[in-house]
Amino acid sequence: MRRPALCCVLLALAACRQPREADGLRVACAANLSSILSVLARASGENVQPAYGSTATLTEQIENGAPYDIFLAADRKHVEHLAELHETSRVFAYARGRLALYTRKRSGMPSAAELSSPSMHFLAIANPELAPYGRAAVEALRAMNIWEAVQHRVVYTPDIGAVRALVDSGNADAGFTALSLVPPEARYPVDPKLYHPIEQWGCVLASSKQPEAAEHFVAFLLSAKGRKILQGAGYAAPD
């Protein structure tokens, strides 16, 4: 694999897309929700303008004054951090994420020995410093006792959404991503005992210009209908 080609792929995927100037809820959304947010928006009846990215990057944008109404993160820590800064008017748990291995080169979940073999040239993982799913992937590899063997072959992406693109382009043999982001025939759930729970929290931001619409969307997200949509996409209910 040529490194310049890989760099081009990563650069194209690195930037978080800012919401357009338009009427609608401005939702900062962890990249793992990119396959399902539009479904939730339509079902709720709200016009949602999303900005996808890693949880850490979106948190930094909010701290710097980005004009979002809602933040849907991939962990609890960053939401609590914003609450401590008095940036939120409401916080809530909305889902528990599930980690999956994505590959198009085999059928069946690779064993630890197969993942650490020389035939696995590159393994894509979201940057664990920015993305909770990336942290979970590293935890799983450590729990399988193969992190030392594979870490020099890991390709880090700016967020979880870029992992699938690397695998689809052939720039990685496999990748750890969110169960919700990959097709059923090519995804292999990782044993949840191998990583800490991915508790996904969100918040309504205190600076929201549309607090009533934001509360309406959150109410739907947490309703039985909203949870059914999330569970259908591969998420578990929060504790």
Image (tube, grey):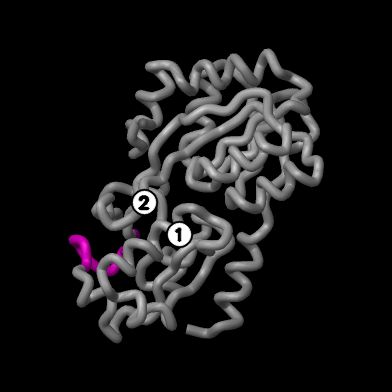
- Residue visible at 60% across and 30% down in the picture: 203
Name which quarter of the figure residue 180 lies in: top left
- Residue visible at 64% across and 63% down in the picture: 12
Q: Taking 10 as reference, is 218 above or below it?
A: above
- Residue visible at 39% across and 24% down in the picture: 227
Visible in this render: residue 84?
yes
For badge 2, the amino acid type reads His
Q: Taking 8 as reference, is 32 above or below it?
A: above
Name the front one of labels 2 and 1. Answer: 2
**Residue 55 lies in the magenta stretch:** no
For badge 1, the amino acid type reads Arg
Q: Taking 222 as reference, is 33 above or below it?
A: below
For the magenta stretch, what is the residue range?
102-110
Q: Which residue is mark 1?
A: 135
- Residue visible at 32% across and 62% down in the picture: 140
How would you classify the magenta stretch by its main secondary structure? loop
For this view, does 142 lie left or right of residue 212? Answer: left
Q: Which residue is mark 2?
A: 196
Front one among 40 and 2: 40
Q: Mark on residue 194?
A: none
Front one among 77 and 216: 77
For this view, does 86 lie left or right of residue 38? Answer: right
**Discs 2, 1 touching: Cβ within 8 Å:** yes
Visible in this render: residue 188?
no
